[in-house]
Image (spheres, grey):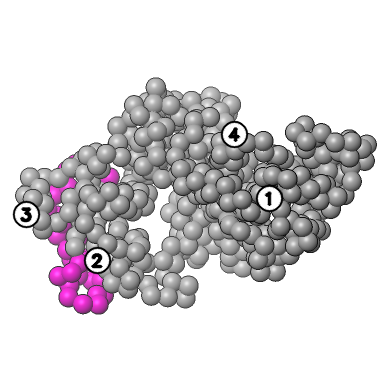
Amino acid sequence: MTFVNRESEIQFLIDRMTSNQAELVIVYGRRRIGKTELLRKTFAKEKAIYFVADLGADQDQRRRFSQVVNLSHPSPFLQAEIPPDWDALLRYIITLAKKGRIVLVLDEFPYLCSSDPALPSVLQRIWDEVGKDSKLFLILCGSFIAFMEREVLGHKSPLYGRRTGQLLVHPLSLRTLKGFFPGYSPEERISVYAILGGVPAYLIQFTDQFSIRENIEKQILKPTAFLHDEARFILMEEIRDPKHYLSVLQSIAFGNTRMNDIVQRTGIERGPVSKYLSVLQDLRLIEREIPVTEKHPEKSRKGIYRLSDNFFRFWFRFVLPCKSRLVEGGERKIMEEEILPHLDNFIGQVFDKICIQILRYLADEKKIKLNYDLAGRWWNRNEELDLVAMAGNKPVFAAECKWSKKPVGIDILKELRRKASLISLEGPKDNLRLGLFSRSGFTKEIESLGRKGEIELIDVRKIGL
């Protein structure tokens, strides 16, 4: 597997590794995000005890755990036909950790808790009695984000207050795609990111040895491809009965972003839809988006729902509606008739989110002089701006983001100025800087204004991403 980026995550784990004191670190993140690969990469040169749980019975889990530990730390104690309980097994590990650093990774920790719900309490007791004074580096890793935040990190968890650190592993950013696809142009890398997002397991399915069209046909549309049924498999792993969730996700993928629209499109009552949306948010598959200027977003009634995972958005928009035709081997026809005519529009709908990353990159690299705290979309009942950056409660930058094959012209700038005047400002309106993001550059008139410093022009083909 190609391993790209994750420098800060690796450094965090190494710092804990070299602290010379007991560490209990929680590592979590959605499936396919690369948690296991991150841990194996970080501890490749260490004699780490790495145990991956499954859905087996508790006794089988303990038996496999004993076998894993026995490989690196042989002991007759570990070779019993019926493995001892978790209390005895973990105390044995801590005995070893009294002498020197021991790294113990319990991957898929929620599965262990499913087979033995008392395990968090057992861990808490052992940690308090002997673990915190040892040199044990214990990592609890899991993919069920809601479970990890509630049952491991939450204040009602027996382990609450024991952790020495936590790491939520996020999708990779756009700037990392150059490591995956050095042969692609910036425009092509943005297209891939709009299709696959930042999930490493999805990115490695594509190659810059093929065109994006060929990759879609071979790695998504082909019924035998890894990505072909990936969205459905993920939902089946996370949710007992995914059929209603599939309907809700498809509704959002087709542009139904408000509760009433989702209810009408799916035919499901409002109460259950609200529950499904909450679960999908916990899984980090959708997000509730609020206008970035809202001072109290948690109370805002302007929220809309968007798929936060780009690949799920692509799958529900283009693959699921064509499933029966694809089974018959019509990848090329689906590509030509259903995807290519709409692909630019599809990418354009997520280009604003991509430009938020581009703006952060430009600010971090000092390629644009702009200090701000957060950025996002703004809208009211009738108007919308693709990107507004906020410093505190004050808008400091507003931009339109155009994924068009035509250079951006003066008409777009006039619209930007008009919309920007609608944003409520604290302070003089002159403080609000304007910008344009473009796939295809700008007209000469706009470029002239850019040279005069009247507007920030960001041609995404020329920024080094």
Q: Going from the N terminus, do you reach mark 4 or mark 2 first?
A: 4
| Label 2: element kind | strand
- Judged by depth in the image, the label closer to the viewer, 1 or 2, is 1
Cα distance in 3D space between marks 4 and 1? 19 Å
Instruction: Give the residue type at disc 2.
Output: Val
Q: Pick whichever, 96 or 59, lies toward us.
A: 96
The residue that appears at 75% across and 62% down in the rendered structure is 128
- Crowdedness of circle 1 by 10 Å Cα count: few (<14), some, many (20+)? many
Instruction: Give the residue type at disc 3.
Output: Lys
Give the residues in magenta.
Answer: 403-432
For disc 1, the marked residue is 135
The residue that appears at 58% across and 51% down in the rendered structure is 19
- Crowdedness of circle 4 by 10 Å Cα count: few (<14), some, many (20+)? few
Cα distance in 3D space between marks 1 and 3? 61 Å
The residue that appears at 24% across and 75% down in the rendered structure is 425
Instruction: Give the residue type at disc 1.
Output: Lys
Q: Are marks 1 and 3 in contact (CB under 8 Å)?
A: no
Q: Pick whichever, 1 or 314, lies toward us.
A: 1
- Crowdedness of circle 2 by 10 Å Cα count: few (<14), some, many (20+)? many
For disc 4, the marked residue is 44
For disc 2, the marked residue is 396
Q: Going from the N terminus, do you reach mark 3 or mark 2 first?
A: 2
Cα distance in 3D space between marks 1 and 2? 49 Å
In the image, residue 122 sits, relative to residue 178, either above or below, namely below
| Label 4: element kind | loop
| Label 3: element kind | loop
At which x and y percent is residue 342? 36, 40
In the image, residue 402 sits, relative to residue 339, either above or below, namely below
For disc 3, the marked residue is 452
At which x and y percent is residue 368? 22, 53
Q: Are marks 4 and 1 in contact (CB under 8 Å)?
A: no
